[in-house]
Amino acid sequence: MRQRAKNILRPKATQERAKAAPTGKAGRNLPAAIGVGAALIGALLLSLLHPFPLAVLIILAGALGLYELAGAFARSDSEVMLPPLWVGMVGMVVCAYFIGPEGMMGAYFATLLALVLWRSVESLDQSAMRDILVSVFAATYVPFLGSFLVLIGSSPQGTWPVALAVLLPVCSDTGGYAAGVKWGKTPMAPKISPKKSWEGFAGSVVAAVVAGTVGMWLLGASPLWGILLGVAAATFGSLGDLGESLLKRDLGLKDMGWLLPGHGGVMDRLDSILLATPVCYFIFRVAFGW
């Protein structure tokens, strides 16, 4: 039992899977990707019935994402300290839900302090600073950015802006995928993500702008805000995708995990959403006067 608990708190280094059969130009198992994507959308829609189940879903997804990050960083002999991160994630989400942005920031800084203390109690050898830095990165990347969804869901407009904040990166990914497969010729960052093209990015922007314009109109805001929202979500979502691709390339991984067939791991789906969410939150605040 003790060994099992140790394995959960300190996962083994993620291993790269053997290469699968060719999956087409975009490198995906498309039927599996569509099926898993539909299931994820269904889970999100059910969680939008009330901010509380939304917060629970964010905590569950974040816990899995942190576990994947811990396994990925273990490949470089770095330890992502999961116990204080999991507790800190619950604290950030709960404070965002009950207190708001100030409480969320307080819980975030408390988590950073807890990470330093947790590693200092264990030892202060040469690897301590490296472990603290990767854990601080994980705390910022997953629970802190993810908590912005809770702030959006606690708004006067209810949880529907959350649906838009998640839908925008999804539309951006879908538009980029379709345009990249059809017209992609000019690599955007060949050393980081060879399959990404500027034509695909143009498709991402168009799809996100259309979704943003319609979504903001349905929520009662000017469609001009939707255009800004779409461009911002596509841009920051693509940066999030490229950032994780750079991280995976540095760690020698194609996917962060294998939990979601056709998509990879949880973090492979959250990368663009996490980076776009804070931008959506601040645009919502100005557009709706929160």
Image (cartoon, grey):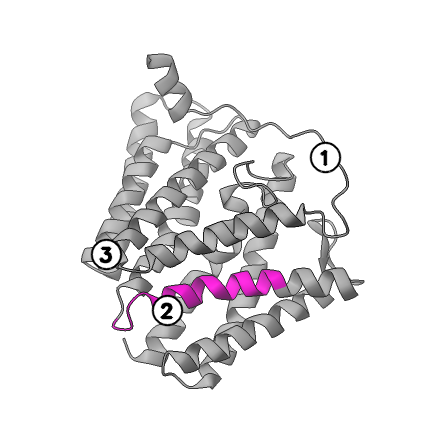
State the residue position of label 1.
Answer: 20
Q: Earlier in the sequence, mark 2 or mark 1?
A: 1
What is the magenta range?
156-174
Name the residue type under label 1: Ala
CB atoms of marks 3 and 2 within 8 Å = no
Q: Residue under circle 3?
A: 97
Classify 101 as above or below 244. below
Question: In the rendered view of the protein, which quadrant contains the N terminus?
Answer: top left
> Residue at left 37%, top 69%?
161
Q: Is residue 217 magenta?
A: no
Report helix, strand or loop for mark 2.
helix
Tell me which amino acid carries mark 3.
Tyr
Q: Quadrant of the C terminus?
A: bottom left
Which type of secondary structure does the marked residue at label 3 adopt? helix
Q: Position of residue 245 (x, y in %)?
A: 62, 47
Residue lying at 45% horizontally and 81% vertically, measured from the top left: 225
Nearest to the observer: residue 83 or residue 55: 55
The verdict on residue 160 being magenta is yes
Give the number of the mark in front: 1 or 3: 1
Q: Main secondary structure of the magenta part?
A: helix
Q: Any mark on residue 161, and which? A: 2
Residue 187 in the image, given as x and y percentages of width and height: 76, 59
